[in-house]
Amino acid sequence: MAAAEQGPVNRPEYVAAAGHRVRTTKQFEPNCGKPTVARATLYFLVAHQGKIDDTKYGVADLQMLAAWSNAQAPGPYELDRNEAIHEIQGNRDPSVDFPEWVERVDFTRGTG
C-alpha cells in the first residue's frame, strides 16, 4: 500500500486526494457529549446483539464507554429523545431510563 499523499502545508494531517484526516489510532474521542455518545453506542450493542463485528469494540473500549456514560446522568435532551423514540418506534434505551444498569450489563455479548 502506498503512503498517503500529505495534505496542504497548513493541514498536513489531511490526505489531499481523499479529503479526510490521517489517523494514527482507530479510536475517536469526541470533545463533548461523551455520555450521550456512550449510551447510544451501548444501546446499539444491546439492541443489535451479535451483529456488530467483535473487532470493533474491545473490553477497554467498552469500559471507556461505560465510564463516559457514568460521568453524567442523562439530561433533558436524552430523556426527551428517548420518549419521542418510544412514541414512534415503541422501544426505549434502558441506559437512559436506568443509567445505573450500565455497570451491570455485559456489553461484550453485543459483539459477534
Image (tube, rainbow, N blue to C red):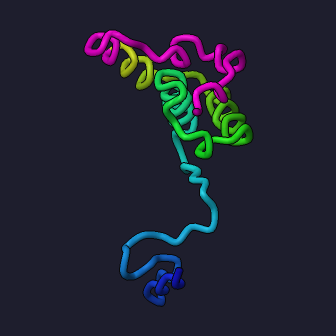
75 or 62, which lies in front?
Answer: 62
Farthest bottom residue in view:
9
Q: How far from the left and from the top, in percent, is residue 109? A: 63, 25
Q: How far from the left and from the top, in percent, is residue 36? A: 51, 32
User: Magenta stretch mostly in which secondary structure?
Assistant: helix
Q: How far from the left and from the top, in percent, is residue 46? A: 53, 22
Task: Give the vertical position of 38 relative to 100 (above or below).
Answer: below
Q: Which residue is rendered at x = 36% and y = 13% of the image?
A: 83
Q: How many marks?
A: 0
Farthest left residue in view:
88
Q: Which residue is rendered at x = 54% and y = 84% of the image?
A: 3
Q: Which residue is rendered at x = 63% and y = 62% of the image?
A: 25
Q: Which residue is rendered at x = 31% and y = 16% of the image?
A: 84
10 or 92, which lies in front?
Answer: 92
Q: Is residue 105 left or right of residue 89?
A: right
Identify the magenta region: 84-112
Q: Is residue 108 magenta?
A: yes
Quadrant where the C terminus is found in the figure: top right
Task: Give the vertical position of 33 relative to 75 (above or below).
Answer: below
Q: Is residue 77 left or right of residue 85?
A: right
83 or 21, which lies in front?
Answer: 21
Q: How far from the left and from the top, in percent, is residue 41? A: 52, 33
Quarter residue 106 falls in: top right
Task: Give the vertical position of 94 relative to 26 (above or below).
Answer: above
Q: Is residue 58 magenta?
A: no
